[in-house]
Amino acid sequence: MRLPFTVTLLAILVVTFWETGDPLPASRNSERAIALYDSDPTHLWNRLCALIVREDAPEILDGVDSLDPLLWPETEHLLAGPSHARALRVLDEFLQTHAENLIRDPVKRAILQRDLWAVFDWSAQQQSASRRPDYVNEKRELQSRLAEVLRRLAITPKEIESLPNNYAQAVASGSFAKEYDPAHREQAFLPPDLLDPRGPWVYIDSSPEAFNSGGVAQAHVQAFSGRSRFLVFMRLPEGRKATLAYLQTLWNFPEPWVHGPESADDQSIVNSNLPSFPAGTEVALVRQMVLFDNQGNLAPAPITESVQIRAYHSITATPPRYFSGDWAQVIKNSGQDFYEVRLSRPLLFAGKDGGLRATGREEKELSTFQQQGDDEIEEMEEHPEFKKMWAPALQTCLSCHSGGGVHSLNSLEKILKPNRRQQDDPGVGP
């Protein structure tokens, strides 16, 4: 898996890491009490969570269980004011006391590496709003410390391979329904055979050309800088053979691309007459953890971070990304039910339900996926009225997948032929 410049920058920062000096006086009382890695909230690993958990987050949010740090492109948290000083202080203490040796559990080390790596990547990509400080020195101070902490936390390739298959554990726990139930559409489920290579779910991979290196769900891979891999699966109600036959039908469709508006930059668009799959079809996006080992090599880990499933109870003719009326109407027009099962750090460490939990139907979160600009937490503080427009997390899937049937698949350009990036290059094969 190819990563952006971040891994190279991290390596440079490790090499140039400074000799640690005297830390700032510790002030543990100013940091939120968290008992995640140890039952003692004052444990240094718990206090390191100050880089992950936003003390200024709305009460409805639990930062300890947010899948990703609540940091946006223009966020100044951790770079300015008390939050920056606290971050440097706890990182210095971690490094000077060799706190990486306090906990040897590979699962906990992997999770802490995962979360701090996300903070590092954010700091490398952060761009302040106009007329705001660029925080060059503050980023360097944060990154140099984070780089060394990440190097020390890295586990061996064998330990990465031995991390739990938490999806299988979650299925075996019996805490989740096994299939979509039209009579109980509010109920999340985990298919036991989702990851079975011979089961009814078909894994959809992209062709091996260089421009397909991000896989089918390229937008997701890029949004998280390659720290996770994203696997796309489809299951038609008649099973694996029918699913493969449908994908072959799409591939053989005589005119998958048609002329778009003359004003469009790309005048080739997906044919609206593509054959759709039947009602009862399900599509899943599985996000799994990627780590780097103690040799600096990237390695996929068996820990599942989230499973998002869309079940099509009806097939509508709604075009891609079509919005009309309120959320309820958009959901109805899509013909879909949305589900998510996601990683919970406390559950994972407790060995319960494979560390996975279902996202509630009305549960709300602040997403960092493909978000631009302002810090949403600060925006809500300045504009309380924004909270009234805060939609449940599961409804946000409609932002990209509001179309009906095949028109809700954003990966179409990867599974149709010829790929639109091949059309003007006769030297590229199918």
Image (cartoon, grey):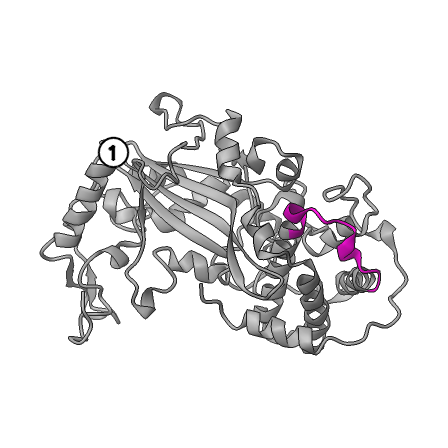
Please report the bounds of the magenta region as a residue range.
Answer: 96-109
Crowd tier of the residue under label 1, counting other residues whose Cα lies within 10 Å: few below 14, some 14–19, many 20 or above: some
Q: Residue furthest left?
A: 254
Q: Does residue 64 sit above or below 130 in this rendering?
A: above
Inspect the image, locate mark 1, and give the three-letter code of the amino acid beneath it: Gly
Count of residue discs: 1
Q: Does residue 385 sit above or below 156 in this rendering?
A: above
Closer to us: 241 or 211:
241
Q: Quadrant of the C terminus?
A: bottom left
Closer to us: 353 or 377:
353
Mark 1 element type: loop
Q: Residue furthest top?
A: 183
Q: Quadrant of the N terminus?
A: bottom left
Q: Residue furthest front?
A: 158
Q: Is residue 135 visible?
A: no
Q: Is residue 107 magenta?
A: yes
Query: Residue at coordinates 23% horizontally, 40% vertically from top-left?
Result: 243
Pointer 1: what residue? Answer: 239
Query: Residue at coordinates 26% horizontally, 59% vertically from top-left?
Result: 413
Compared across the picture, whether 97 is left or right of 374 comes to right
**Residue 284, quarter of the rendered image:** top left
Residue 178 position, x and y percent, is: 41, 27
Residue 92 position, x and y percent, is: 81, 65
Query: Residue at coordinates 88% horizontally, 58% vertically from top-left?
Result: 26
Compared across the picture, whether 210 is left or right of 19 comes to left
Residue 365 position, x and y percent, is: 56, 45
**Residue 116, quarter of the rendered image:** bottom right
Q: Is residue 199 visible?
A: yes
Residue 299 position, x and y percent, is: 51, 58
Q: Is residue 201 magenta?
A: no
